[in-house]
Amino acid sequence: MKAQRKARITNNNKFKFNILAGSLLAVVSVAALASSHREAPSITTTPKADGTDFYMFRSYETNRSNFITLIANYQPLQDGYGGPNYFSMDPNALYEIHIDNDGDAQEEITFQFNFRNNLRDLQQTIGSESVSIPLIQQGPVNTVGSTNLNLNETYTLTVVRDGRRNGNRTMATKTSGGSTTLEKPVDYIGEKTLGNAAAYQSYADAHIHNVTIPGCASGTNQARVFVGQRQEGFAVNLGTIFDLVNAPFNVISNRSFENAAAANSIQDKNVTSIALEIHKDCLTPGSESVIGGWTTASVRQVQIGDGVPAQGHQTAEKVGGAWVQVSRLGMPLVNEVVIGLKDKDRFNASKPSGDGQFLTYVSNPTLPQLISLVQTGNAGAAPTNFPRTDLLNVFLAGIDGVNRPSNLVLSEMLRLNTETAPTPIASQNKLGLAFGDAAGFPNGRRPIDDVVDISLVAVMGGLCVANGSGNVLGLNTVPGTNLSSDCSSNSVPLGNTSLNIHDAVDQARVPFMNRFPFLSTPTPGSGTPAPTQTASAP
């Protein structure tokens, strides 16, 4: 039945993407824009449901290479000192990670995360009265379920197959004991409460749960899951970028300034990560090795404020009705810098199967002209190949021979070839596939991948310059359509300069771990985190 109701576009027009060091060695992108932080008007009012980044990659942890890691980050721009309530997840929201494993732009597997925040109402005896404390902790915390925690966060993981709302639902269970309740660590309040960075990481590690995923064959049904606060893993200079790229053109077009021109303005911020490590064969039950993934958050359709809230935790609103999707994130940057302002909320509420409504934003993007105007004062500096078949291929189809599924419906999502072997952390290149690292973005996305310098490479025509007049990369047509254009050096007014524009912030300088959950120990409310092992990059 599912196959009958889904429209498929057969991939008949394949193009070659032979990435050679000589052709793409200098390919980088335009000035950086943050990865989906506060990217749409409505989501700014619902920060607990705001998805910031989505990662999907073959694990490069020792002896875990057959596993796929999925990481969905939420709640952007957290300050470590954000007390007294900090950044618990919303029990009235539904957080999901979706997997399309047959190329039809609809989810075959959905991982649903539901949270419960239990207020213990810890009290102190003051004179002859027992009085509730105003904090979420009353002393040091170093164990799962510490009795000093006033607010205890837990969650469940539900696996839904063939339709997120009406499909078959089963719950993941702890491998030891069979419980469906999974504990979440409290945010890094500070060193006095939770110890130094090493102590906090040990405490957080105790919340990495081994779980059994229902519906997967024996031997592929064992997974690991972690939900908790992590250090922001994205590098960007937010103030400068959104001030009309307030940097001299001679700086951002000169690669020698890449690591010296700007600071990473969000390095001291935190996010909340939902991380799942699952065997690749559990995600690809058929012959198709390419999977697509994206994350969403939904809230109830009706939310009513209570003028006289009951005692307890988060009792000031009453919710009901159907789930309404308010956040969506697959490929980075799409809603933030591609989708028009009037459609940003609509995109956040949409599904990949309906992406035809946003096609013009990709085929005729405004960002190249905007960048040309604010940086060169000349709108004519933008590429002229319309429709932009280069962008349509990279962002909506996947790359032929790399991460394009055999059957394809054009749609926006992060795509990963699960058969591509992972690159060891010490050998990873932050510029990913374009610099010969086959396991890097846009073939999935790892924490070290500089998605700004990679995924916007085509915006100012860099890929068309590399494609050349001989169509070396085969970017002149779009599979399954009659769309074509002259994606060549002739259509790029900036010429080779488009290959040298950069964002002046080095993604490779962000610290990461070489093991699950990969993102680093968060910044504490007081104290300084210890250095964390980083991936090396050219």
Image: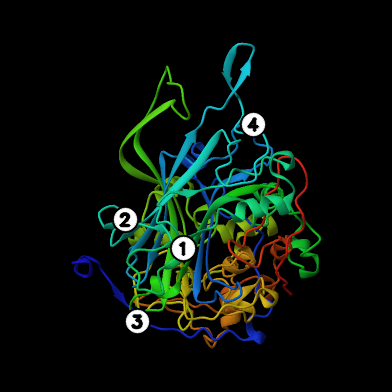
Quarter of the image holding residue 442?
bottom right
Q: Return the residue at label 4.
A: 138
Crowding near the residue tagged with mark 1, few <14, some 14–19, many ≥20 C-alpha atoms within 10 Å: many
Tell me the distance, in whole angstroms, between the alpha carbons under discs 4 and 3: 54 Å
Q: Position of residue 212 (x, y in %)?
A: 41, 63
Tell me the distance, in whole angstroms, between the alpha carbons under discs 3 and 1: 30 Å
Residue at point 67% right, 74% down?
Answer: 429
Q: Return the residue at label 3.
A: 287
Amino acid type, residue under disc 1 in the picture: Val
In this picture, is 119 found above or below 506?
A: above
Q: Return the residue at label 2.
A: 164
Amino acid type, residue under disc 2 in the picture: Arg
Crowding near the residue tagged with mark 3, few <14, some 14–19, many ≥20 C-alpha atoms within 10 Å: few
Residue at point 44% right, 25% down?
Answer: 316
Element carrying mark 4: loop
Q: Position of residue 54 (x, y in %)?
A: 52, 59
Q: Return the residue at label 1.
A: 362
Q: Nearer the viewer, residue 277 or 503?
A: 277
Tell me the distance, in whole angstroms, between the alpha carbons under discs 2 and 3: 23 Å
Q: Position of residue 87 (x, y in %)?
A: 57, 40
